[in-house]
Structures are given as structure tokens and as C-alpha cells.
Image: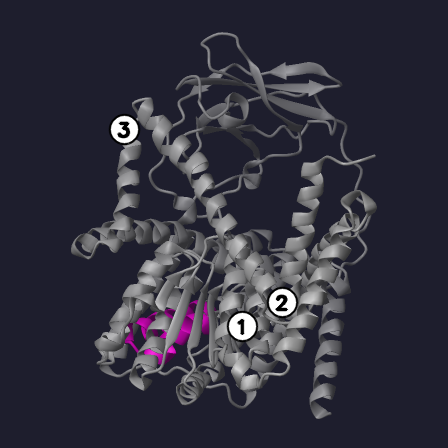
Amino acid sequence: MIKHKALLTLFLSLFAVSGLFAAKPVPPAKKAAPPAPAVITGLTAVDMPYDAGNAAILKWAVNPADAADTFYVVYVSSLEAGGWLEADRFVSSAKTGKDVELPFWAWDGSSLEHAVKVELNNTYGDTLPGSVFQFKVAAEKNKQVIAESMPVSVTPVGNWFRLDRMNNLVLLITIIVIFFWAVSHAKRKGLFIRRIAGLDAIDEAIGRATEMGKPIFYVPGIGSMSSISTIASAFILGEVSKKVAQYDSQIKVPHYDPVVMTVCKEVVKQSYMEAGRPDSYREDINQFVSADQFSYAASVDGMISREKPAACFYMGYFMAESLLLAEVGATSGAIQIAGTDVEHQLPFFFTACDYTLIGEELYAAGAYLSREPMLVSALKVQDFGKLFVMISVFFGMICVVLGAKFGWSAFVSSVLNLFQNF
Amino acid sequence: MALDTSIIAGGWLAAGLTIFLFSFLYKDNPFFKIAEHLYLGAGMGWLFQVSVTSVWIPKIWEPVSKGELLVIIPSVMGLLLLTQFIPKISWLSRYGFTFMMGYGSGLAIPAGLSTDFMSQIEGTIRPFSKLASMTPFSILSSLIVAAGTICVLFYFFFSVEHKGHLKKVSNVGIYFLMIYFGAAFGNTVMARFSLLYGRFDDLFTFSGASYFYATQAILAAMVIYFVIHWLVSGRKPASEEEAA
């Protein structure tokens, strides 16, 4: 009850605070001065920085006298004379240096000049007709040209380095450094991982299968080897098959993808060797079923219903076959443990399985079971990533709210730039 | 109007296979096994022709025929994977796998950093940049999204034990997850029902006189089989039936 009251109080407080920051009526704007004739001064064209060499950027001074119905039209030509094609058209108040989508550390735009990015692929298609391009800008009012610039030329070139993605690089380097620190720390002192409920049931499931003398089905899903959940599943399979070998139980792994089957064969073989039972390993533990989703589901359903396994593991990437498999397993009376990062299939596993690993728990499972320093370190790096996101969201939100409240638009833009995907 | 014989035969096949697969709802039976094995075989056959007509011919055979020999390199890398089946040279498959893993990681890591980290943070805090034009409800909505993001992420934080106040944050994260899962469940179930209606609609169509009552005939035949099977096997002990 106290908990509910606290939640209600929190909700009402949030609502009250949001009311303080909400929009207020805006006073009427002052009357503008009468417009003066349009002029285009200081037109320059430069290669668009940090791109693949298919864009240019045009700059010219903003004319404060431009009327609201004045349009600028940008023309491009690949010929020395003539051949002009319209590349862009916009109202005179739009597209200033501040509107170019580049972060503050890679672009210093001013609202006193127009800056227009011209993507040549949009005009000429994937193959550009030349290397040097001419540009000119015209000002139009009521479809009449009122001013036109002299042509300028530029040679677009591709860039090797994307300075605009520096934020990604810094984060990547930080993650790499933390990973190596975590590996070193894990080897020396070990790293803590909290208990994951579903994984404690693995021993119980394998023990049950051993007592009943029935097989265990391990279904690695329909993902390819490039899927992260399939890679995590292969790690868990290694630990499960090691325990199966120790208990001298039976395991069957029906496959959808031949490449995954090849990897899993090696994983299971290695586990049997590590358990000191290479003689118990059989080539038919891993068997290819079908690379067609529902044929695979129908066939695995048939196997489960006929062989009545004691335990079923569904770990990896699953789509619509998730409920088809888990429901048949539940009907056959098997203890079922599932794990996937496909969030829209998780509800089906919740309903039909005894334990379900949600998303990241699947990735953590391999490290939790094996306590391998490399995997534990990878888990620590993931935790660092989550911590980074949580802290960034919390403080980023405070900074943006304060910036927006006090009108620090440059500060807000800089904060957003730090996390923007360019 | 009388239908073509091939269309009627197709109707019987479709109705039969649909009912055979649905019969699994009762129990495992020979009809389901027929449909299961047919499905498996047809699926493999279909995938084989897709591989030949969509991959082998346009991506390897035709370019090589035109003298574009560079495609041989990835083709050989792909073929190396098959050396897994020949133990003596199975080590060659590692080259193919290594290339796939390297290529996959190179593709996934930068994209993952952008989408899972940067875009996630930016998407959560960006709405607050338009604070001046936001209504109290939109501010509250953005706050709930931010709080939900933090709490759900904390649920997946494995480096600390979830105890005391931290457990409360984690529990709020579970509530957010369960709300999402409930919505996803309802959405997917509705989509599955539309598939079920599609099958029922077909069965209804095939139950007409123009299809010579295919649905009813197949259903009746199956019911007769199950009744006879029940009468015959019903006299046997359960253990004997299971052993058989």
C-alpha cells in the first residue's frame, strides 16, 4: 500500500514539475521592416567534408532584406558552359550554416550565411558524369528571377576519416580499454556477476533428464552465426553439453543453419573432451533438419512429441516458430528453459516455458555458467555500456532541460551532438 | 461452373495438408507425420532451387561466364566451409569462418555503437530540447520514457546485486518490460489469428460442392481412422501401445 502511495506521489510530482516547464503563451511579434531587393554576395563552393565524394557545400551571405516569399534556387552543371540542372530550391529564411547536419567539433556554421549541401547523386544518379562541377544560385520572387550569382566550381573528393563520427570512435576506444582492463582484472581477482535465476535451473533440468533416462533437446533457433544471440547460444550449449557429458545423459541439437551446426559440432565435441568423456560423443548429437522456418518447426515438434524429452532448451534467435516449439515441449511434459533477444517472441516463451532468459540475460548466461575471464570481461563491458547510457540519459536530460528553459540553444545543440548519429 | 481437375486436386491437397497438420492438436498421428515429412522435403527442395536460381546462376555462373573472375574468391571462401565434412582438410573451413566472423564484427560493431548507444540516448533526451513548445502531458510522457529506459537498463545490470533500493529500481524496470511484453503478445496473437482465419477460409472454400466436399470428406475419413484406431488400441495396455 505504501509502495502504491509512493508511486502515486511520484507520478503526481512528475506531472506538477512538467507543468512548470510547459509551454507559455508567446507575446505577439514586432512588425518587421519593409523588404529590400535580393542580392547574392560571396558565393563559394567547397567539397562537402567527411563524405564519400559525392556532395558539395555552397555558402553565401544571408541577406536580411530578403522577403518571406523569396526563394533561392541552386543549379548544378557538369559541363564547362550550360547544362544547368536544378539541384535545390528553398525559402530564403531556410538553410543557414546552423542547419548543416554536422556536429560542433566538425563544423562551425554561422546563421549569417546560407550553407546548402548539394548531393550530386540526387541529380546525376549513382555514377557522376565528371569530377568538376559548376554551381550557381538564383533568387526568385513570384517565379521571376530577381538576382543570380556568378558560377563557381568545385571538385568533390571522398574522405578517409569521418570526423563527424568522432563520438563513436571515442566510445569504441573507451570500451576497448575497459575490456582489456576487465580481462586483466578477471584473470587476477575474478569479477562479480549477480545470480541469474533461469540459469540455476539448468542443473536441475539436466539432473531430471539423467534420472528419467530421457534425452535433452537443445534448440539453437533459426539465427545465422552472425546473430549475437546464436553466438551466445553456442556458449551456453558448450556448458550444457559439458554437464550432459559429466552426467552421461543424452543431448540432441536439431539445426536450422548448416554453418551454426558446424560450429555447434565443434563446441559439443570440445565440451565432451573437457568433461573427460570423448568416448560418449556421437556425431548425430547435432543434426541438420531444414533451412525452411516452418518445416524446421514442424519437424522439431514431431521429434519432441515422439521422443518425449525430459528437458528442452530454446536458446538463440527465434521468430514465429517460438510458440510452436515451446507449446509442444510443454505438452510433452518437459522442463523448459528459453532465452532469446527477440523481444516480440519473449511473451510466448514466458507463457510456455518454466524459465526464460530475457535479452541480455542470454548474453550473460555463457559468462555466468563458464566464469571464463574473457566472457566475464565482455559482460563487464556490456555493463559499462549500460551504465554509460543510464548516466548519459540522466545528466543529458537535466542539461537539455536547463538549456531549453534558459534559452541556451547552442548548449542544447552541443549536448545533443554528443550523442547524435551522423 | 465446373472447376478444372487440377484446381480440384489442388484444393484436396491443400485441405488435406491443413487438416493433417491441425490433427497434431489431438495427438501425434500418421497423418501429421505425412504432412511433416512432405513439408520438410518440399522445404528443402524449394530452398535448393532458390540457391541455384537466385545465388549460383546470377551471382557466380553468369559473372564468371562474362569474365568477372573476382567472384571466384568469395565462392572459394564459401566452398571452404564444406571442407568440414572431410576431416583431413577440415582446418581449411576456418578461413571461411574467420572471414565471416571478421566481416560480421566489422559490420555490426560500428552500427551497434550508433544504434544501441548513441541513438538510444539522443532519442530519449531530444524531446526535452523542445521544452518551450511542450504540453504538461508530453513532458510527463518524455519523463516516463526516460525513467523507463534507466530502470529497464538497470534490470539488466549484472555487476551489482539487486538488493534494497536497487531492487526497487529493478522491479520498476520489470513492470515496464511486462507492459511491453503484454502489448507485444496481444499484437502478435491478433496477427496469428488472421493467419488462422485464412486457413479456415480456405477450408470453407474447399468444403463446397465445386470441390466435391473435400474438407468434410477428409475430416470424416480421419475421424473414422481415429475411432477404429482407438477401438483397436484401446484393448491394449497403455505401456504396450507406447512401446509400439
To which residue does mark 3 refer? B69
* Whole-percent x, y for residue B226 in the image: 67, 70
Q: Which residues are magenta?
A: A361-386
Kindly identify which chain the residue marked by label 2 belongs to.
B
Q: CA distance from mark 1 to mark 2?
A: 10 Å
Residue placed most toward the observer, B19 or B234: B234
To which residue does mark 2 refer? B24
Residue at the outermost top position: A81
Q: Residue B210 sits in which quadrant?
A: top right
Mark 2: secondary structure:
helix
Q: Dot 3, crowdedness within 10 Å: few (<14), some or many (≥20)?
A: few
Compared across the picture, whether A74 is left or right of A179 comes to right
Quick check: A209 above or below A148? below
Residue type, mark 3 in image: Leu
Q: Residue at x 71, y 92 (%)?
A: A2
Mark 3: secondary structure:
helix
Q: Are marks 1 and 2 in contact (CB under 8 Å)?
A: yes
Q: Residue at x 35, y 54 (%)?
A: B105
First in sequence: mark 3 or mark 2? 2
Q: Residue at x 80, y 37 (%)?
A: A31
